[in-house]
Image (spheres, helix red, strand yellow):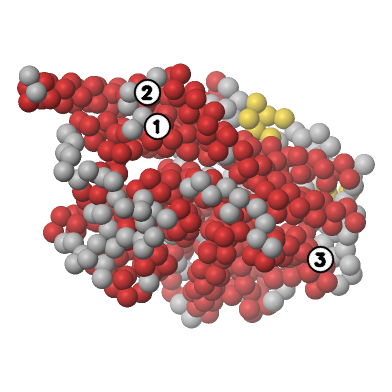
Amino acid sequence: MNWTQPIDPLGNRALSALAAFVPIAFIFWALIIRRMKGYQASLLTIALAIGLAILVYGMPVSIALSSALHGALYGLFPICWIIIGAVFLYNITVASGQFEIIKHFMASITPDRRLQAIIIAFSFGAFLEGSAGMGAPVAITSAMLVGLGFNPLYAAAVCLIANTAPVAFGSVGIPIIIASHVSDIPEMAISQMIGRTLPLLSVVVPFYLVAIMAGVKKSVEVIPAILVAGISFAFFQWLTANYLGPMLPDVIAGLASLASLMLLLRYWKPKTVWTFREEPPQTLALDVTYTAGQIFRAWSPFLIMTLMIVAWGLQPVKDALNSIGTAKFMMPGLENRILKTDGTPLLIKPFEFNYLSNSGLAVMLAALLAMPLIGMSYREGAKTFVATLRQLRFPILTIASVVGFAFVVNNSGMSVTMAMTLASTGVLFPFFSPVLGWLGVFLTGSDASANALFGKLQATSATAIGIDPLITVSANASGGVTGKMISPQSIAIGTAAVGLTGRESALFRLTVKHSFIMLAIICVITTLQAYVLTWLIPDYTMLETTASAAATETASGFTYLLILAGALLLIVAAVLRLNRSSLSATRTVNP
């Protein structure tokens, strides 16, 4: 028996939108006012959403429960699987003692916490977002900052806020590719439009990060580094997005920002070194020197991980791995059961268990390959993995609950009710357009999912009021990046990575105002683009909706994997050779 989504179940659009907004308001209240633990707030929120879906929207109980289960499974795989791999890789570097060398190396570049935050959270985090996405950048960079001696709460907050600048181009451009698919606007046009919006935000993010940590006065002391990091990142983000497309802006801009900062710090240092007031006394023995081989060995897990996730992000590699092994199945009770208001079935994607092509496997394989190189036995690695699972048990529950909640909200029609209410604002819609993206990312934790959810609605609403749909479709992705930092899924990842599980409310309160400030900036920029700065809109031609997809290049995927294997062999050989050289030098000094 089919069920049709009601868009206005209470007979009044405003009241229906308020009813649909209740679960979101509840999770804000639970985290900000009641200061609940993340998993408690998430479990109560999904229960409330299921109740509203059944009682207000008339959703059959079986469909509501199947939707929640479908979302929970997606939360466990691939999202939690990727996070487990990322935190596990970090944990093995700590357990093996290699992270002490990384800390020493970073301190030798700069012991200043302000500069370390820019280097790791902003520049390196953007590179990881462009390669992997799915929460891995926040998990890895926040754990690294804590390892360096950062206040855990500020480490997580800084990394969540830094993650705004690159999210729209994350995971090798997947959010923009999805936006193009649902809106029939070319990928390149969306990439160009976002590339003319987000660089304005990217310039100020490094200053924003430092100001949150140290205040405006202390931020001015490192203004050369802030400007170099922000401007170099923004320039290459603009350049790549406008002339190369959506796949590489984060990777290239992140690397350019890192290189520019390293070059600057060779010739300039701040007059004073800033650390957290409550920071414990440093125990780093700065008189100890490490060889190039030891430093390379310590960084090798992250280098291997980077190569692996870049390779896994290439579509031909995904196709090649999926041709070997993947499994799909439709969630029982959902296939063709939900109808939209026009009578067409709501597209429910099957659950895809792509165990080979998923980025989580790439990170896990990187950890397994790195263990022998950093002197860790697989027995010790297994103990570390069990400890990682124990560390992440509550965040895993939180993420599964949050994604289940998102699926219930989407399948019941609640998200459409809220979206249609915003779309009815007429000429003000360009201002509220980024709010839809923000809402979508808050609900799903993913800019790609937000674009899939609201991309078509953005395009249709813009056309109805006579503005270019490219503006609002791009605004959905640009506005969505500001919701990432307070998505319950992201908050759970951040607290888990820094050992603050149970203190999700504290992290949420620290980041929520910054989310709204950045959202307001994107709203103003989008409104100006719609009515004043129309010359910023690139020329483009809508895609033919009947165009067939290009044939996948499975064979080239295997070729890329062979190239990856060769690169990994070179890294292994380099680590072994440099280690032998270090041992020989040690024996010579101490015969």
- Classify the position of the N terminus by image quarter: top right
Image point (60%, 44%), residue name: 395
Say the numbered circle drawn on residue 376: 2
Residue furthest front as drawn: 281
Say if 381 sits above or below 521 in the image: above
Q: Is residue 531 visible?
A: yes
Mark 2 is surrounded, within 10 Å at the Cα level, by few (under 14), some (14 to 19) or many (20 or more) other residues, namely some
Q: Is residue 202 visible?
A: no
Say the numbered circle drawn on residue 19: 3
- As shown in the figure, which amino acid type bears the numbered disc 2? Met
Q: Nearer the viewer, residue 405 or 411?
A: 405
What percent of the width, then of the height, locates residue 297?
27, 31
Image point (77%, 64%), residue name: 22
Mark 1 is surrounded, within 10 Å at the Cα level, by few (under 14), some (14 to 19) or many (20 or more) other residues, namely some
Say if 350 sits above or below 512 in the image: above
> SS at mark 2?
loop
- As shown in the figure, which amino acid type bears the numbered disc 3? Ala
- How far is disc 2 from disc 3 in space, using C-alphas? 54 Å
Residue 48 is drawn in which quadrant? bottom right
Residue bearing the label numbered 1: 95
- As shown in the figure, which amino acid type bears the numbered disc 1? Ala
Mark 3 is surrounded, within 10 Å at the Cα level, by few (under 14), some (14 to 19) or many (20 or more) other residues, namely many
Q: Nearer the viewer, mark 2 or mark 3?
A: 2
Residue furthest right as drawn: 1
Q: Nearer the viewer, residue 519 or 211?
A: 211
Q: Quick check: marks 1 and 3 in contact, CB under 8 Å?
A: no
What percent of the width, then of the height, locates residue 3?
89, 48
> SS at mark 1?
helix
Quick one: label 2 or label 3, which is nearer the N terminus? 3
Position of residue 82 in the picture relative to residue 584 (left or right): right
Q: Quick check: marks 2 and 1 in contact, CB under 8 Å?
A: yes
- How far is disc 2 from disc 1 in space, using C-alphas? 8 Å
